[in-house]
Amino acid sequence: MNISLPKENLASCEHYSDAQPTVIASIAKLLKDGFENPEKVSGSCQFEFFDHQNTVWLLSVCFDKNRLELSTEKLENIDSKIRMPIPIAEKIVSNIECVDYRDPEIIGQMEMLGNLNIVNHLAKSLVKPLKTTQATFLDATTIYWDAYAMTSIPYFDSPTEMEILEKIEKKQPFIIKNASMNIPFKKYSLEKLKNAYGNVLLRVRSVKEKETVAEFVEKMTRSKSQNVSKIIEGHTKVYTEGCLLPPQMIDDFLPHYFSKHDFSAPQIWLGSVPTDVPASSLHRDPLDGFLYQIMGRKKVVLFSPDQAQYLYPMKSYNNYQPCWVKYESPNLNDFPLFKNAKPIEVVLHPGEILVQPAGWFHSVYCLDSPTFSISYFLNSATGVHLEDVEG
């Protein structure tokens, strides 16, 4: 799909400049350094950066299986376009090791048009990991091999905080049953969510798209079965995609373990997702994660950290590391080593919490609709050796 973007279609008050701010050169370098294309796709995208005076600077990107080309020339026919204010570009570059493009302060000031698969592909290049994140994954991959012989996920009934930490330090996932909560999971339905939090702002999708809890629940109830081939991760599923849990909801959905200050900001996974596409594609996190299931069941497919070589993790990442290979439809021509990978599957039921030590790869699938989960991470990985990491 191509979209034609001649200058005359832009606001008449905008004008173009050849003298680019240095941040655009930084964006270009990040794209060049982080770009990968193992799936051998082709595409083009035009970045438009603008200031408060509506001066516009361009960065055009074209790529195919053999090359990546960047220029400051305007392209007449392109697959996609990304518009953002210069201050947002500066925020991305200055925070590249931690930036989350779901952040309302970022995505709420951006506009994305055309082929969103191309937008996703380029966004994967615009991140870099912290040294502590790299060290955590290296530790998980190389040190704890004895822990990875497990073939099933154990269950524990109402463990104490100390027992949870001890189990995490063994570097093996487990499921908590009967965790104490402020409000039991059985008391929630879509209607009760809407009644309790209806006017709460749930997520921001772009400069033009914002939804309250009530609006999103209405969208879920109206949605029909989605055409799997038309689903674009992060954009088109009727799913919150792990946006931050609104502050008004936090106390009701965190278990009585530790304090909320021990966890990173919780994320909400609410929506309707077809069973044959991942609700979360294959990736690994650098922190010890908790996934609390509230409505519906989810299948979680896990791979131990020592199998990284079979899973083709992306070289550019920050808060989590995605993989190129798709568990549900692996292309063994492009990713032949995946045939050696050994998954562990588990079904997470309402009221259960899956605990995953840092570095475990996982992909998540919804078995029921609607689905509702909350995830959160301990602020630092348990038992990780970071003594030699700088800064």
Image: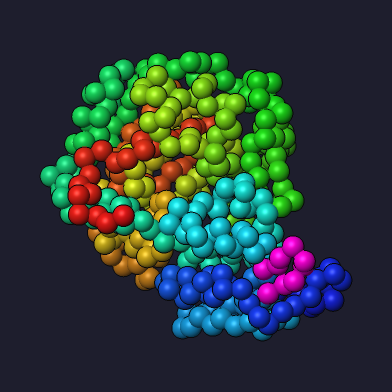
Query: Vertically, is 246 above or below 232?
Result: above
The quarter of the displayed image where residue 382 is located: top left
The quarter of the displayed image where residue 113 is located: bottom right
- Residue 382 inside the magenta-drawn segment: no
For the point 31% across and 17% down, the residue is 158
What segment carries the magenta color?
Answer: 49-57
- Horizontal side of 295 relative to 312 (left or right) equals right
For the point 38% across and 58% down, the residue is 129
Q: Residue furthest left?
A: 146
For the point 77% across and 66% down, the residue is 53
Name the spot of residue 365 as percent of width and height, x first: 46, 42
Name the spot of residue 372 as percent of width and height, x first: 53, 32
| Quadrant placement of the N terminus | bottom right
Name the spot of residue 110 as percent of width and height, x first: 67, 57
- Residue 52 inside the magenta-drawn segment: yes
Colour logic: rainbow
For the point 51% across and 71% down, the residue is 26
Residue 126 in view: yes
